[in-house]
Image: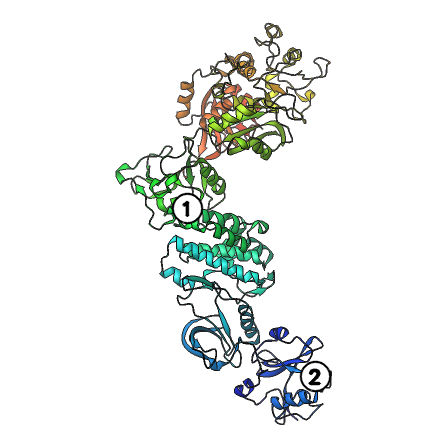
Amino acid sequence: MTTSSITMESNEDMWKLEFYHGFLPREDTYELLTNDGDFLIRKSEETSGQERIHVLSVNVCGQNRHVIFRNERGLIAVDFGLEKGYKTIRQFIDAHLAKGDSISSQAKVVLKKGITRKKWELAHSTVTQGAELGRGAFGIVRLGRFKESPSSQSVQVAIKEVSQTSTKEQIKEFMNEARIMRQFDHKNVIKFHGVAVGQEPLMIVMELATDGSLTDYLKKTRRSPRSKLYMCYGAAAGLDHIHSKGIIHCDIAARNCLFSSNSVKIADFGLAHKGTSKPMDKDKPVPIKWLSPETIRDHAFNPKSDTWAYGVLCWEIFTNAQQPFQYVSNADVIPMIMAGKRLLFPLGTPPLFARFIRTNVWNGTESKRFEVLEVLSWIEQHIDEMANDSTTTINLSRRELSNDTAFVEIGAREDTVGQKHEFGDSLTSDEKGCPDADTIKMFIGQIPKIWDEQQLKEYFEEFGPIYQLSVLRDKDTASSRGCCFVTYFHRKDAINAQNALHNVRTFPGLSHPIQMKPADVENKNERKLFIGMLPKAMDEEGVRALFREFGQVEDCSILRDEGKSKGCAFLTFVSRSCAHQAIRKMHHSQIFEGCSKPVVVKFADSEGSKPNNGGPTNNQGITQLTTTGVETLTSLVTLLQQPNIIPLLETARVLQQLQSAQTVTSPANLMLKTDQNHQPNAFKLPTLLQPNLHAMQQGGLLGLSPGMFFQQPVVGAPSLSPAALSLPTSVSNAALHSVMSTTLPKLPMFSPSSSASMPRTEAANSAQLTEKYHRGPDGCNLFIYHLPQDFVDTDLYSLFSHFGQILSAKVFVDKQTNLSKCFGFVSFAAESSAQNAISGMNGFQIGAKRLKVQLKRSDAKPYEKPIA
């Protein structure tokens, strides 16, 4: 006897059964069948791709069982071994409800209560299909009308229908979307009327968005920044409602939002998931350019990944639905996102909002990223401020200089001209007028050549209002050189911009990150302090915290040797007044634990920069050192802090003479830390240093008073005094100048006999530096690697001028970015000077790197290995 699972009853007859639920998937039965004996009838496929069958779903002792109706000889049953069957499903149900017996011989399955359809399970007769609006992955979206009841008025709706050829799996996903949508009731989430499940095609009936997709609306309609802010606010409110239901969307984007009644409405829940995490389906495409770093890394979605995608949605809103990373492939976007690259907000975006998205929504660390509820709360607090900001209007008022006022920027090449733009008129009233007295003019390289001043101004104004901006342009073609100068009204904004942009962000389409540094006109030394007698356990953050009360700190660096703190630091404030106040309040104010003397706080550049608090100082009467070419005290201190310079300054007799020196106290102590890895007996003093002992004894160390130089007992090799000896730990400022101006020239390596005559005037020094690099005799030309990027020719000259007459000093600069390439050349007049410079400066530490100093190859022997 042939048995079939195909029943002969029509869709209309089946819908008359109040417990018939059409194509309701198995997953929905768990919510409906809650008690033992609850049952419903639905339609499905026994095997994917086969004909549709009717299934009886029953709750049996808390577990759902799903049995198939069979057809044999025109009769209906689920177990023909138990009974002969019935003509219709209705007769089968009525009979077993009346008898209360089991419908199966294999297990006791008793039908007790048929579960009726819910309000959201719609009859096809209530829906009228209209014109096609679009097509999706599984079907068609149509215009239509929906009549909830015979007595109600029909309303215009959008109908999303699944294709009749859809597989069981596709129907499951379609119904999953309907299951999720029916939980929402919010003005910023598309309204769900119901799903027509009685027959095919299955249809989700939802609110009609009168303005269509958000993407299309943004492309054809220009909205003000104020309106776009409220669009972003609405999207955040809708997403927060979704998350409040324990659901993650997994595909937040403009293409999945609609616009109607002046509101953004989140839609398209095809990838949505109930829970806190959803593994990524590797067999399905994912929206790469909207993914958060942890989703890319872990292949899983979470609520915070929705927050990230929301930030991209905001970017789409302000760019009028441009494609994120438009000119970058998906494969290339992934490493960019993981490396911290972020989208750039365009013209008209309120700077405060752009900063917020970048910092809190696109934070690469998931734990630090805001939840959507926090985003919504922040926008609620600041939306009026941002919406009323006059800098966010579309037609920004600005005052542009006419073409005849084009000018050549300082530091620009002769064929480069800049068009200056002052933006005072486009700022809020309290920001009009002059910028701060200590404002910084910033040079910015690696910018798009197709961007004009207004676009750049809008981009860089993310960090604060801009006073002046100029793009460097070719004087003949007026095309951008890819760099500009920017002056902010407030210094702190420039510092914040530099920290956020320099070597961090990269403009789309460019291969190198933004380069941002103060222009050459900035005098940093007027704000830079030297701090000595610090605890060696204190790091940069501790120093910043110590001085934070005096103003904003721009930069801080601990001086280290072999990674160990020397107990001193350089600290730069954003203004000179802050530096002055720090000196007045902190200099000699306390003695830190582990230090023998009070903290030293002073300007790092020169004697003239130090404030006089009314009392005499130990530095009075010390003349500017010009005979050795030393321009700043900083370079001398740094020089003496190098372990390998000690042999150049100390002989056995010098150390013996200094051993008896008296300890003196000076308000300008500079701390020098002995390298623990260098033992006293490890120093092999060069034979070139043999000063006359008799000369040293006259007047104490060649004219220096006893105790003037080293302030603690000093020793060298074991052949010296048998007393316990140690290297210098501190030196007074006056002593430094005296040693460099008086003592060193008397030593053979610094005498005119070994290095010819030294330059005598600053004018002479400057004259040499303004010329191009001049090569000296063979054996006199040095190649220096690992220079700080802010080093210029004068810094290099000053650093090496102690070793002899310099013919030329040149730091090489990139012509495109105007930034140092971190290497340079120095040419001496004498070979002995070059050798002394190699001995003293190779391994010299500046910041985190050590200089590499070696002889430049001779042109006659280009493949000869340099001598280091």
Is residue 233 rendered to the left or right of residue 839?
left
Q: In which quarter of the image is the C terminus?
A: top right
**Spot occupied by residue 121 in the image (x, y as percentages of width and height):** 54, 77
* Amino acid type of the residue that numbered disc 2 sits on in the rendered structure: Val
Residue under numbered circle 2: 110
Instruction: Residue lying at the far front in this picture: please name it.
Output: 151
* Amino acid type of the residue that numbered disc 1 sits on in the rendered structure: Tyr
Is residue 702 rendered to the left or right of residue 820?
right
Mark 2 or 1 closer to N-term? 2
Res. 447 image quadrant: top left
Nearest the camera: 273 or 71? 273
Tags 2 and 1 in contact by the CB under 8 Å rule?
no
Question: How many callouts does the rendering have?
Answer: 2
How far is the residue under mark 2 from the one under mark 1? Answer: 70 Å
**Please, what secondary structure does the residue beneath circle 2 have?**
loop
Residue 459 tag number: 1
Judge whether 861 appears above or below 76 on screen: above
State which mark lies toward you, 2 or 1: 2
User: Which residue is found at the position 37% from the left and 54% from the top?
Assistant: 224
Is residue 686 rendered to the left or right of residue 476?
right
**Spot occupied by residue 859 in the image (x, y as percentages of width and height):** 47, 29
**Can residue 58 be seen at all in this image of the molecule?**
yes
Using a 10 Å C-alpha cutoff, classify the residue at mark 2 as few (fewer than 14 neighbours), some (14 to 19) or many (20 or more). many
Residue 388 tag number: none
**Spot occupied by residue 290 in the image (x, y as percentages of width and height):** 50, 57
Nearest the camera: 240 or 610? 240
Q: In which quarter of the image is the N terminus?
A: bottom right
Q: How has the structure been colored for display?
A: rainbow
**Please, what secondary structure does the residue beneath circle 1 have?**
helix
Judge whether 697 appears above or below 126 on screen: above
**Spot occupied by residue 361 in the image (x, y as percentages of width and height):** 52, 51
Judge whether 484 appears above or below 680 on screen: below
